[in-house]
Image (spheres, helix red, strand yellow):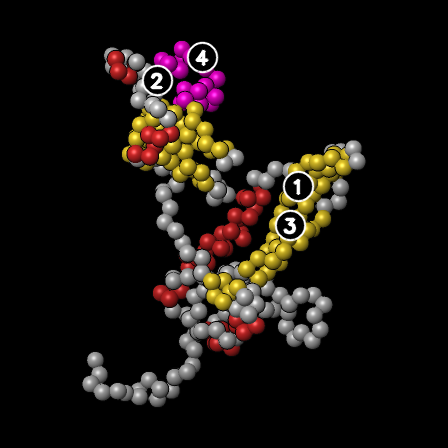
Amino acid sequence: MLDEPSLSNITDPNFGRPPESQNVLLQQLGHPHVSSFNYMINQGLDQAISDLNPVEFMVNGDKITLEITDASLSCPLVPMGTVGVKSPKVFPSECRQRAATYKGRFIARVNWAINGERQTAFDKDMGQLPIMIKSNKCHLSAMSPAELVKHGEHEQEWGGYFVVKGHERLVRMLLMTRRNYPIAIKRSGWKARGSIFSDCGISMRCVREDQTATTNVLHFVTDGTAKLMFSYKKVLYYTPLVLILKCLCDYCDQFIYQKLIQGYQHDSYYLE
């Protein structure tokens, strides 16, 4: 520690010169957010679109079918037809100064058919979405520290946030239950779900490849059986576990019963 102030830093010949590369540790601050956004635009959109069902409706006696097959998100650009533009790119510093949103255009590819006969596909402008700073769709993603300073950014800019109406907005991350992993829970509120429901159950947060999630609970009821709680169209259903087994496998009741009691033939409590 210095005993008195020193001017050695500002008298250094390299003072004010941006480094050749960014600090790796500082870049890790925004990496979780940036990588999540990159996953969304590179893979998540395709997986979400693959789960969309075609929409069918009638018009003047003809059946119209609409299906979204592809979607893309563009980099922030100046609107086409703008006069006097030197560069079509829009940078975050400009959006901060103009109280604008750093956003890109979202285009969806739509296939459609009339009475089952395919028609020429068309692109539909779905509006604009905010672009995360330093993501793959951001103009700053591949810039060096010197280029960042030239465009009004900090030399160690790590990104991971949005610029919305001139303000920097950060999407706060949440701690979620481990996905696709059963967890035994004892919760007193479960008793209110029915007269024979107990406070014991096994909860599982099930997540699909497109990152949509739902929570299923296997309830232990006081008559010795179990009921599976699942949601469909925002409605909760409680179904006996044996009924779920019957739906998932094409076997007779005797075969299912023999498989369930295998190894517990002498356990009277289990058999009852």
Residue drawn at 57 percent across, 72 percent down: 98
Q: CA distance from mark 1 to mark 4?
A: 40 Å
What kind of element bears circle 3? strand
Q: Quadrant of residue 191?
A: top left
Say what amino acid the circle numbered 3 marks.
Ala
Q: Residue at x 30, y 13 (%)?
A: 272
The CA span between labels 3 and 4 is: 47 Å
- In the image, 234 versus 113, the foreground residue is 234
Tell me, yes or no, whether the highlighted magenta stretch contains residue 246. yes
Stretch in magenta: 240-259
Mark 4 Cα within 10 Å, few/some/many (few <14, many 20+)?
few
Residue 122: x, y in percent?
A: 72, 48
Mark 1, Cα crowd under 10 Å, few <14 / some 14-19 / many 20+, is some
Work out whether mark 3 precedes mark 2 in sequence or the reverse, and give the earlier one: 3
Q: Badge 3 is on which residue? A: 108
* Any part of residue 82 in sight: yes
